[in-house]
Image (cartoon, grey):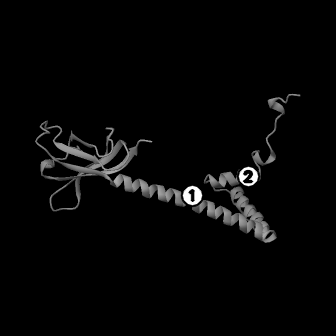
Amino acid sequence: MAIGIAAFRFPAFLRHGCIFSHFASAFAGESSREAMMAWVVGIGIFLFLLLGFPKQVGSLILLIVLAGGGVALYYYLDQQAYARKKAQIITEVGTDPACSDPRFPLKIQFTNTTAETLMRVSFSLEGFRPGYSDVVVSDYLLSSDRIMRPRDVYAACWGYPVRYGKQVNYPGLKWVAKVTTATFAK
């Protein structure tokens, strides 16, 4: 016996207007009296279960907290490992006679000292006046997709960042390149 689509009905807890739809609207950031009442009812149900079955609900809460802590620890350690690998990409910036084109006077060199192949590196380029700490000119959206095996060195000539027609003595600046993101081969 086949059931047509018109004969199918969603379970009551999935239908619009049920108490769970109010919880969903509260999570979505909608502020309404119904959403507030849904939270009050939900807290009441939780307290009833906590008082009626303290060991089981306490165990469930402990399990949820441990699982959440495990996930948070995993992401924290993963980010720390990524930051260590990213710090192993050495950048050097300066003017070089080999960069003879006046449109591209800066030589930016990358050295991959990690044990993995580098697929892409994004970096920021900042120019400082000698003896000062404020950035005079910068560009934060630069990247290179040059594939670099471990211990490879790659250098290229890059142009000065152009910002709003400012007249700045770019050749007299101290240049710094900072790696913002790095993509490694899988």
Secondary element at image label 2? helix
Dot 2 surroundings within 10 Å: few (below 14), some, or many (20 or more)? Answer: some
Instruction: Confirm whether residue 50 shows in the render.
Output: no
Circle number at residue 20: 2
Dot 1 surroundings within 10 Å: few (below 14), some, or many (20 or more)? Answer: few
Q: Is 72 situated left or right of 180 in this image? A: right
Residue 71: x percent and y percent? 57, 57
**Number of marks in the rendered image:** 2
The quadrant in which residue 43 appears is bottom right
Q: Which residue is drawn at 43% across and 56% down?
A: 81
Q: In which quarter of the image is the N terminus?
A: top right
Residue 51: x percent and y percent? 79, 71
Q: Nearer the viewer, residue 155 or 29?
A: 155
Q: Distance between the residues labelled 2 and 1?
A: 26 Å
Q: Nearer the viewer, residue 153 or 43?
A: 153
Say if mark 2 contacts mark 1, CB within 8 Å. no
Residue 25: x percent and y percent? 66, 52
Q: Is 101 situated left or right of 48 in this image? A: left
Secondary element at image label 1? helix
Dot 2 or dot 1, earlier in sequence: 2
Q: In which quarter of the image is the C terminus?
A: top left
Which residue is denoted by mark 1 in the rendering? 71
